[in-house]
Image (tube, coloured by chain):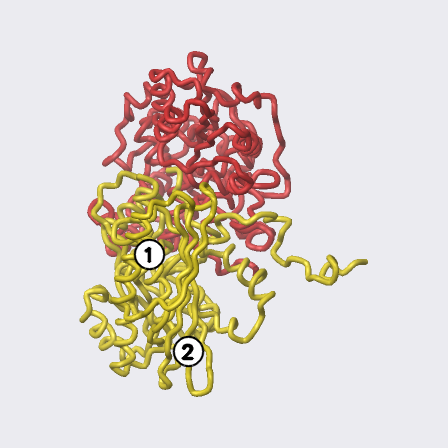
Amino acid sequence: MTDPKKAAGGLSACPVPIADYPEVLLAHGGGGRLMHQLIEKMFVSNFDNSFLQQRHDSTRLELGDCRLAFTTDSFVVRPLFFPGGNIGSLAIHGTVNDLAMSGARPLFLSAGFILEEGLPMETLWKIVSSMAAAAQEAGVQIVTGDTKVVDRGKGDGVYINTSGIGLIDASVNIGPAQVRDGDAVIVSGDLGRHGIAIMNARESLGLETSLESDSACVSQLTLRLLEEGIDVHCFRDLTRGGLASSLIEIAETSGRHIEIDEERVPVLDQVRGACEILGLDPFYIANEGRFVTFLPESEAARAVEILRESPLGADATVIGRVADSRDNLVTVRSVIGVRRILDMISGEQLPRIC
Amino acid sequence: MKFVDEYRDRERSLQLSRKLHSITTHPWRIMEVCGGQTHAIVKFGIDRLLPDQVQLVHGPGCPVCVTPLEIIEKSQEIAARPNVIFCSFGDMLRVPGQTRDLLAVKASGADVRIVYSPLDAVRIASENPHREVVFFAVGFETTAPANALAVIQADSLGLQNFSLLVSHVLVPPAIEAVLDTPNNRVQGFLAAGHVCTVMGYAEYEPLAEKYRVPIVVTGFEPIDILQGVLMCVSQLESGRAEVENQYSRSVRPEGNREAVAMIRRVFRVIPRKWRGVGEIPCSGLGLNDEFARFDAEVRFGTTEFTLDEPSECISGEILRGLRKPPECPAFGTHCTPEHPLGATMVSSEGACAAYYRYRNFERGTE
């Protein structure tokens, strides 16, 4: 009998269940279960090394005495311009935030552009200008880049990739593995604005709302907590897949149990209303300027106070704690006081029928 | 948020729960018909506030789940045609057919679009006169008026390139099918508030009388559902079998007359297959003769195609309240939301999917 792993001239067989998914689906990029399977079985298994095992937003590299955070992110958002930002500002915020989640001070970024033939120069200028402004605000420099142009119809105007490097202070040691029993779980602000603002702009839902994306650079907040001497155990930004996916990833990586109190999770009425209409759950909606942090309960009140000093952290709140259990689960106490398990969704949330 | 939070109040929920505990003296099995109610029950944990003797069973009221396999296959066949723009509500895209779902058809290059209203599909048809635009008209009585309106609009615009793939089903025949099941164990029903907002509740009176079951028209928030259960248990405890209206802030006895008139103008009652259940007489809607030219099945020649359901899945028994999701050996092991075997794992409103997502304490390892 042929060993499937030895088939195809010594190359390993593809471990993603290709019988079920012979082609890539949009859900493979949705931040849910399918994307995690793709990452684990396709990428991690092929590129396997100890750095990938950190399972964090950015990877920590040690070069002599110097500790670096390194990350990369690609941006394919539609529409290119949305209330509260555009693909350019988003490309800076996303990568800077990934660095910040390691406790790093973001320093240098690269920018790769894939442009579609026919893209108006005026549009590109606006995007690049707002990248420059966002970079300046975040205190980072864009020090290298790349440009490719594809045929008309082969791209959505512009795709951007940014990679980033930041410096991690010698005293900082944070990541999912540092999460401890009894830690407070703090969210830095209200949830779901980015996802709903984008959906409203993209799908022309006609929701009459002044809602803007929360897209922002959060490194000032994370660095401020560290400078104030708060014993931060973990940061995680709440992008694709929302709060739910981030918490589930941390519960699974740290092997602990996280309890959330639904009533305490801040969500704007406009976002809740849109979610009610569309049958979506704010726990799974994307954010671009929000993170959770895990730190000792004794320091939670002061951490919230520090976060709230900045407008970006004005709604920072303790939403739950790490319980004394080893079941890798996240549970939520519903508004009527009953607990349920928070599960990762398969792909993107799809609006419900009724 | 106004108009929602007052129906999710913790104190009020606990009060209703205490009342229910105090009046319950016998074991009762009550079916909530609508998938939206199932979703709320499991999401908020409403069933955990009920006395042990009161058991909720999840009925066949998820339109996504009960759409038969053969219609799913037809939708994929039509969507894959080169000149077609296939429009659907989002959650139909993940419903598996025999080998794939509409998302996979889209990934292979078909033009499949998520719309939020059938009127969006009419607009797409008028903007793309050289392409065939098909709307996947799925749902209960709730979505039928908007779908009827889409046909009326397309007709008045003189559109030749718009059609509906219709798979409309009706609630009362489904309740009757449950009650006619030989070993039926359901003793009372929470009828679906939104359906009754459209249709009223006169058609439930003969059912309550014939089968001697209480039927309470119920809303979708925790307080609504707890109140509905309380009203139903009160009837059962006192030996009554009446139609009552918990959801009076939305439902009038006669329903919405204009909406009903629109449904009657465009659709007629026909037999329909239900995924997991089989064919139920007079349980669905199809386009009537005046609007038959908007029937995608006629236009694309799929009327003759039929397909039987696989037998390994117990969703038929779950939809009739005979068994609960964790009683299925496949639940959470080789049947998951990523790889659903049958109807009730398909939609997020399906009983198995709702159990899996919110109540996976007892599921097997992945």
Colour in which chain A is shown? yellow
Q: Chain of mark 2?
A: A
Residue type at tag 2: Leu
Circle 2 crowding by C-alpha within 10 Å: few under 14, some 14–19, many from 20:
many
Q: Chain of mark 1?
A: A
Is residue A168 depicted above or below B331 in this figure? Answer: below
Circle 1 crowding by C-alpha within 10 Å: few under 14, some 14–19, many from 20:
many
Looking at this rendering, what residue extends furthest in the bottom direction?
A: A65
Tell me residue B216's x, y (percent).
34, 36
Can residue B188 be spotted in the picture?
no
User: CA–CA distance between discs 1 and 2?
Assistant: 25 Å
Camera-nearest residue between A16 and B11: A16
Q: Residue at x 51, y 55 (%)?
A: A34
Q: Residue at x 29, y 26 (%)?
A: B255
Looking at this rendering, what residue extends furthest in the top direction?
A: B290
Is residue A13 depicted above or below B65 in this figure? Answer: below
Looking at this rendering, what residue extends furthest in the right direction?
A: A1
Tell me residue B243's x, y (percent).
33, 31
- Of circles 1 and 2, the one toward us is 1
- Residue A68 marker: 2
Provide the secondary structure element on which disc 1 rests. Answer: helix
Residue at image mark 1: A88
Tell me residue A195's x, y (percent).
33, 51
Q: Relative to residue B141, is residue B184 drawn left or right?
A: right
Tell me residue B306's x, y (percent).
61, 27
Q: Earlier in the sequence, mark 1 or mark 2?
A: 2
The image quadrant of residue B126 is: top left
The image quadrant of residue B200 is: top left
The image quadrant of residue B201 is: top left
Residue type at tag 1: Gly
Q: Which chain is red?
A: B
Provide the secondary structure element on which disc 2 rests. Answer: strand
